[in-house]
Image (cartoon, grey):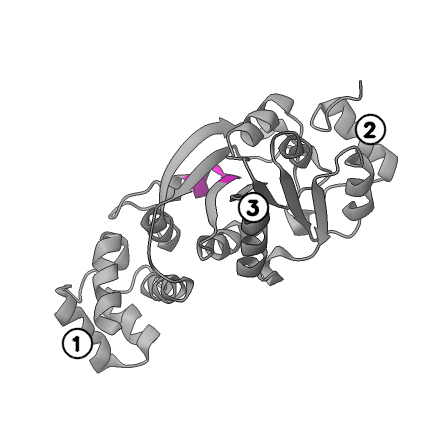
Amino acid sequence: MTKFISVPSRTKEILDQYGIRAKKGYGQNFLVDPVIVEKCAQMSHPEGAVIEIGPGIGSLTEQLARYARFVCAYEIDERLIPVLKDVLSAYDNIEVIHKDFLTEDLDAKAAELKKQYGTVSVCANLPYYITSQILFRIFECQDISCITVMVQKEVGERFAAKPGSAEYSALSCEGQYLYDVKKLFTVPGRSFNPSPNVDSVIIQFVRRDTEETPEEIRSFFALVRGCFKQRRKTIYNNLKEYLQDAEKASDALQKAGIDPSRRAQEMTTDEIRKIFEVLK
């Protein structure tokens, strides 16, 4: 029986066979821990379709294909497309798309997958350098009910951070607004090839029911990012810059009952939401 791709010796064999080396520019680190990879796939709510971003040489993709009805994997590195098609050829439920995930019409793709497979989740070992951008984009898509991602430990800690803490950020605010967030487990640096200098964590987001439209969510998130744009600035100064209108910013804060001298990192999601409702 052929070893799973995530077995270190099999990973090395594939990398040597195709002359592949991890590209720092794409934040590539290949998972070489079969226990963690399978556990991650099993816990990702793979009942229907699963979207993966950055499959690399397919270690997680392979395990997802064993549990999900369908796997849609986005890979930006053209060197890896023929590798993926070769090493995953035994599976007929995988679509490998050579594309920058951030340029995809995610709403349309997720709606298509949901219609065909019932549920859509995301499971990925995210490139460290672009984690926030990818998650911000996924958060905006209503049809994705569960997100299970491997991220740098310090990034993972931001998701669970509370207002007033140093780690609390726009990412914390957005994630906790739409999702129940929990840390599943820690992944040591030695579980990757090459091994990074930091540990990772696997974080899971399960979406709460909401009646808001994608447009409303995007508008609210734009406001959140505006409020957090410069952490040292007061909510008034950031909001004034976001709105390009000092009087409108002052009026909105007054109507929302927010002290203009406070900072966004001290405020709850509900408080920022009050500003959004006033500005509607």
Bounds of the magenta span? 148-156
Q: Is residue 138 left or right of residue 71?
A: left
Amino acid type, residue under disc 3 in the picture? Tyr
Where residue 233 sits: x, y (%)? 28, 64
Q: Residue furthest top?
A: 1
Q: Which residue lies furthest to the right in this view?
A: 17
Q: Can residue 125 be seen in this view?
A: no
Q: Mark 1 points at which residue?
A: 251
In front: 99, or 235?
99
Q: Distance between the residues labelled 2 and 1?
A: 64 Å
Q: Distance between the residues labelled 3 and 1?
A: 39 Å
In front: 35, or 88?
88
Determine the secondary structure under disc 2: helix
Q: Name the residue under label 2.
A: 13
On-image quarter of the C terminus: bottom left
The residue drawn where x is 17% and y is 76% is: 251
Say which quarter of the image contains residue 242.
bottom left
Residue 107 shown in magenta: no
Amino acid type, residue under disc 2 in the picture? Glu
Labels 2 and 1: the sequence-earlier one:
2
Amino acid type, residue under disc 1 in the picture? Asp
Determine the secondary structure under disc 1: helix
Q: Name the residue under label 3.
A: 128
Where residue 104 sits: x, y (%)? 61, 60
Front position among marks 3 and 1:
1
Q: Residues within 10 Å of mark 2 (few under 14, many from 20)?
A: few
Q: Distance between the residues labelled 3 and 2?
A: 25 Å
Where residue 112 sits: x, y (%)? 58, 55
Q: Is residue 135 visible?
A: yes
Q: Is residue 156 left or right of residue 52?
A: left
Labels 3 and 2: the sequence-earlier one:
2
